[in-house]
Image (cartoon, rainbow, N blue to C red):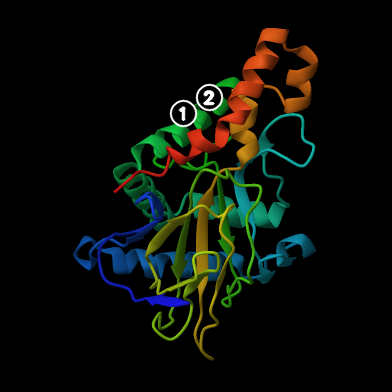
């Protein structure tokens, strides 16, 4: 394993062909009031989640044992169409409160701006897909107007340290954005480990990293006793992109309704999907 220590500013991680597979985006300057945003995100999570009854599925999952509620638009698991994530009354109040929190809105804007700045083609693919979804299905609720991701998960509990896992439902040739928060020393713990790349990356509170979470197994190093760590992830399910590509249909519906010419083109596109997907990782 190789350690990457944190330095201010953005830092790409590239493959042997110089494709940017991962981006350490860093965080805005403190002069822009980002320290207040960091504190505000932590306060909103801690105060808003107090007394909330999370489901067992939200508390115990492949990432670990801590509450990890999600809000936004998703598609998969046999659903016939994209839909808003179902939430209990208490969790819905908590998550919708975060969506309207000033500090979370600033975080969403930072994630959106850095995404577009460093990877405009992928950003526009996400943005246009979400716009197509909300236009076709007006009942879908977009989390933020300044962010192209369809869904947001907030890892709560104060010990949000993920076990090794892959987010295989996410868009495989796409990024998710991970932003940690909380009072912890990033040089002592909380690192993000990218197992397939054999990298251990320091990631301080308030910073953001973009990675293809469906392709790379990732986890965190534990923090020290007395410290607290939370994280916010923005992402989009791969099923959303397939539904839009299929003209507002699942794969099963497409194959039962498509013409022979459409089916032939679908197979051609499927064969080149991997090579086309690599184009979303810019050469730097």
Task: Label 1: state its secondary structure.
Answer: helix
- Farthest left residue in view: 31
Residue at x 31% of width, y 62% of height: 27
Residue 272 placement: quadrant:
top right
Question: How far across and how far down the image is residue 62, in percent?
Answer: 71, 65
Image: 4 above or below 123: below
Residue at x 61% of width, y 73% of height: 157
Identify which residue, 24 or 206, lies in the foreground: 24
In screen coordinates, is 45 left or right of 240?
A: left
Question: How far across and how far down the image is residue 279, in percent?
Answer: 42, 37
Q: Which mark is residue 154?
A: none
Task: Label 2: state its secondary structure.
Answer: helix
In screen coordinates, is 96 left or right of 246?
A: left
Question: Disc 1 marks which residue?
Answer: 128
Identify which residue, 14 or 182, lies in the foreground: 14
Q: Which mark is residue 132?
A: 2
Q: Is residue 39 visible?
A: yes
Q: Is residue 247 visible?
A: no
Image: 278 above or below 182: above
Question: How far across and how far down the image is residue 72, in percent?
Answer: 59, 44
Crowd class of label 2 (few under 14; some 14 to 19; many from 20; radius 10 Å): some
Question: How far across and how far down the image is residue 210, in percent?
Answer: 43, 55
Identify which residue, 54 or 244, lies in the foreground: 244
Residue at x 49% of width, y 33% of height: 276
Residue at x 45% of width, y 54% of height: 101
Crowd class of label 1 (few under 14; some 14 to 19; many from 20; radius 10 Å): few
Could you tell me if the residues under marks 2 and 1 are in contact, i.e. CB atoms within 8 Å?
yes
As measured in the structure, the alpha-carbon distance from the residue carrying label 2 to the one carrying label 1 is: 6 Å
Residue 3 placement: quadrant:
bottom left
């Amino acid at each position: 394993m190789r350690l990457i220590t944190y330095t201010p500013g953005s830092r790409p991680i590239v493959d042997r062909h110089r494709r940017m597979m991962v981006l350490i985006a860093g965080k805005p300057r403190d002069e822009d009031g980002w320290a207040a945003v960091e504190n505000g995100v932590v306060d909103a999570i801690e105060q808003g989640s107090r007394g909330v009854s999370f489901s067992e599925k939200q508390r115990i999952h492949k990432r670990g044992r801590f509450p990890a509620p999600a809000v936004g638009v998703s598609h998969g698991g046999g659903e016939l169409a994209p839909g808003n994530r179902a939430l209990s009354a208490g969790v819905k109040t908590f998550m919708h409160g975060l969506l309207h929190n000033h500090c979370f809105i600033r975080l969403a804007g930072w994630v959106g701006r850095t995404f577009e700045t460093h990877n405009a083609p992928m950003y526009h693919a996400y943005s246009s897909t979400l716009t197509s979804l909300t236009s076709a299905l007006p009942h879908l609720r977009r989390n933020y107007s300044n962010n192209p991701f369809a869904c947001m998960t907030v890892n709560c509990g104060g010990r949000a340290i993920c076990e090794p896992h892959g987010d295989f439902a996410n868009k495989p040739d796409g990024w998710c954005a991970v932003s940690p928060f909380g009072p912890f020393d990033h040089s002592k713990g909380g690192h993000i480990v990218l197992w397939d790349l054999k990298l251990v990356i320091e990631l301080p509170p308030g910073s953001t990293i973009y990675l293809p979470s469906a392709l790379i197994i990732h986890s965190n190093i534990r923090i020290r006793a007395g410290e607290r760590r939370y994280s916010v992830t923005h992402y989009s399910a791969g099923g959303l992109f397939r539904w839009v590509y299929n003209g507002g249909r699942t794969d099963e519906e497409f194959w039962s309704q498509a013409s022979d010419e459409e089916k032939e083109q679908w197979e051609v596109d499927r064969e080149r999907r991997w090579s086309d997907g690599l184009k979303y990782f810019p050469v730097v």
